[in-house]
């Protein structure tokens, strides 16, 4: 395999571990826990994995351990650092006993069901240390939620003598990891299931999880690109750049990029919802800033748009909710099947409430079609397919034409998502992910199941990080999904009373008016700590 100079240099990087994980550990258990909502229901659904304590690893005495075979799955969208979770897990499992083995299931949870796997040996692992991507074993979005799948899974786990499975995924995948842990515990199958918090979206965080891995690197990559565009914008002074950013529902990525680059406008979906803004209100907000800058002779600027914006506009949210209901078969809970797209759209139009139909028909045709047709396997609207950046700039142009002065308004459009999901992990993500993986091996050795691997205090130097585990049931509540009530991990949206949003809100008027762009430049791996090892602004503000 030919490698770039950076790949060769990065391969030699030894990620840092929290001090507590550098030698033998013992698990210090906290008090019993409760789920974040719907306690009675969650307890009833998870009798074997509910109420377990949060644990923290502290240095302990060395103990001889038997070899243990472990399986690993990468689930969902790529996020920088996945390979380091696996290499940390590999090193951790081998440190328990060198005869232990690590098996990777290929192309996501489907690999477990289809018995598609490979043994991960040190030769393979060494090729992927500190690299971006999930290509070591691939990823997939198959939902692991049916008894038949769990039973197919146990067949291969028994065949390979695997005693623990690590599922690296976002909120939905970790919800499924918890359901699987509960099922195997109830059946006394003797297989532990451990989760790891992955997603560039940054929406898998709570009191116990400071951040999901990959968020740091992805935001730094997008911020580099936004900074470059802002330099271009400030040089040519002729375009408004509409930049949509990935992140699914939550606006964490857009907010973090705004904190790093100080654009003229950044929309925050959670605020749009809280203020009950209509699509028209959003368009007016942008058009007013464009017009105000034009009055100052500035016919250029940058607008950051979170990809989930459209589903937070209250009227559209109501419409999506009903679309999710009518497009799900109430008996099977599976998406309804239609002979073709036109039939599906006709069915939707016949079935939904009048006021929702009016909203659907008020949208440009292409957007309405996407809303009616596209779903991911978890039943989520595929927001990343909706070209909100073009929709908004088109509507702003129309709005400006209606004003007396009709300022000059030339636009460029961008969508940043895939550009950052497989970037080489920043030092933060390289260390954080390696620690998460290594720590997962300690949870396994401690006999835990239904836990997520956690590493905290990450704004401090890595040696001071705190490692342990949190029961996944603690993060759960009941939500309506695909037309049914389901136990799920509560998604973390941007909190409008949180420090990162407050900082942004206090500065955005100035950033809108003046040109206050910041140019973060590319991620640096070697050099002074203030250049190479800074966590995200979000984390710094949250932990300040
Ligand atoms: P998960 O980490 O939740 O799996 O998703 C990350 C993400 O990049 C989202 O930001 C985006 O909406 C989605 O994946 C795109 O999905 P796909 O990779 O299937 O195009």
Image (cartoon, grey):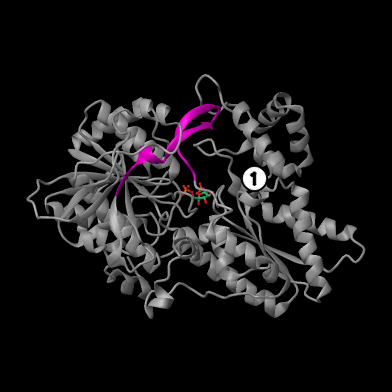
Quadrant that contains the N terminus: bottom left
- Residue 110 visible, this orientation: no
Question: Viewed as shown, does residue 14 lie left or right of 225?
Answer: left
Q: Is mark 1 within 8 Å of ligand 1?
A: no
- Residue 191 visible, this orientation: yes
The residue furthest front is 31
Looking at the image, residue 66 lies above or below residue 488: below
Question: Viewed as shown, does residue 269 lie left or right of 1?
Answer: right
Quadrant that contains the C terminus: bottom left
Q: Quadrant of residue 14?
A: bottom left
Q: Main secondary structure of the magenta part?
A: strand
- On the image, the x and y values in percent for residue 221 come to 50, 66
Q: Is 475 or 337 nearer to us in this picture?
A: 475
Q: Quadrant of residue 411?
A: bottom right
Callout 1 secondary element: helix
Residue 89 is inside the magenta segment = no
Q: Is 384 or 207 nearer to us in this picture?
A: 207
Question: Residue, x 32% and y 38% (percent of image)?
Answer: 112
Q: Is 90 or 531 nearer to us in this picture?
A: 531
Question: Residue, x 43% and y 77% (percent of image)?
Answer: 531
- On the image, the x and y values in percent for residue 341 come to 65, 33
Residue 470 is inside the magenta segment = yes
The residue furthest left is 64
Q: Which residue is mark 1?
A: 312
Mark 1 neighbour class, 10 Å CA radius: few under 14, some 14 to 19, many 20 or more: many
Looking at the image, residue 497 lies above or below residue 342: below
- On the image, the x and y values in percent for residue 448 come to 23, 41
Question: Residue, x 20% and y 40% (percent of image)?
Answer: 162
The residue furthest top is 331
User: Looking at the image, how many numbered discs can be counted on the residues?
Assistant: 1
- On the image, the x and y values in percent for residue 541 come to 49, 64
Look at the image and give the residue range highlighted in magenta: 469-491
């Amino acid at each position: 395999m030919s490698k770039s100079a950076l790949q060769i240099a990065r391969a030699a990087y030894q990620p840092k571990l929290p001090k507590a994980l550098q030698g033998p550990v013992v698990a210090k258990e906290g008090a019993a826990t409760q789920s974040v909502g719907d306690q009675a229901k969650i307890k009833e659904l998870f009798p074997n994995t509910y109420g377990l304590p949060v644990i923290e690893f502290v240095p302990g005495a060395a103990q001889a351990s038997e070899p243990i075979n472990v399986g690993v799955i990468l689930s969902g969208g790529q996020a920088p650092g996945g390979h380091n979770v696996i290499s940390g897990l590999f090193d951790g499992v081998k440190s328990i006993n060198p005869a232990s083995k690590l098996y990777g299931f290929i192309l996501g949870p489907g690999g477990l069901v289809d018995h598609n796997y490979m043994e991960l040996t040190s030769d393979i692992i060494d090729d992927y240390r500190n690299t971006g991507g999930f290509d070591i074993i691939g990823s997939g979005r198959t939902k692991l939620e049916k008894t038949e799948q769990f039973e197919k899974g146990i067949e291969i786990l028994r065949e390979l003598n695997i005693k623990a499975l690590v599922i690296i995924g976002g909120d939905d995948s970790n919800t499924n990891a918890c359901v699987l842990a509960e099922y195997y515990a109830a059946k006394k199958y003797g297989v532990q299931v451990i989760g790891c918090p992955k997603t560039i979206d940054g929406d898998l965080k709570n009191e116990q999880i400071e951040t999901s891995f990959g968020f740091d690197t992805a935001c730094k990559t997008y911020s580099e690109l936004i900074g470059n565009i802002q330099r271009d914008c400030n040089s040519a002074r002729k375009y408004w750049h509409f930049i949509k950013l990935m992140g699914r529902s939550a606006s964490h990525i857009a907010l973090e990029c705004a904190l790093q680059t100080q654009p003229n406008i950044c929309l925050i979906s959670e605020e749009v919802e809280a203020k009950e803004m209509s699509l028209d209100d959003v368009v007016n907000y942008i058009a007013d800033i464009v017009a105000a800058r034009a009055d100052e002779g500035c016919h250029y600027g940058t607008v950051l748009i979170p990809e989930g914006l459209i589903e937070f506009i209250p009227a559209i949210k109501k419409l999506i909710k009903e679309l999710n209901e009518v497009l799900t078969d109430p008996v099977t809970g599976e998406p309804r099947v239609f002979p073709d797209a036109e039939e599906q759209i006709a069915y939707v139009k016949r079935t939904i409430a009048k006021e929702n139909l009016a909203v659907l028909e008020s949208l440009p045709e292409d957007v309405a079609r996407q809303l009616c047709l596209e779903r991911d396997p978890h039943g989520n609207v595929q927001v990343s397919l909706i070209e909100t950046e073009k929709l908004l700039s088109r509507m702003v142009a129309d709005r400006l034409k209606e004003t007396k002065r009709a300022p000059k308004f030339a636009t460029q459009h961008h969508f940043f998502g895939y550009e950052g999901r497989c970037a080489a992990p920043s030092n933060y993500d390289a260390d954080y992910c390696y620690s998460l993986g290594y720590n997962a091996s300690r949870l396994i050795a401690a006999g835990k199941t239904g836990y997520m691997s956690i590493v905290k205090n990450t704004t401090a130097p890595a040696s001071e990080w705190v490692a342990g585990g949190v029961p996944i049931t603690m993060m759960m509540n009941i939500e309506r999904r695909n037309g049914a009530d389901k136990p799920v991990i509560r998604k973390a949206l941007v909190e409008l009373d949180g420090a990162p949003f407050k900082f942004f809100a206090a500065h955005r008027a100035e950033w809108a008016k003046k040109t206050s762009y910041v140019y973060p430049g590319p991620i640096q791996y070697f050099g002074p700590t203030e250049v190479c090892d800074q966590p995200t602004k979000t984390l710094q503000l949250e932990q300040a």
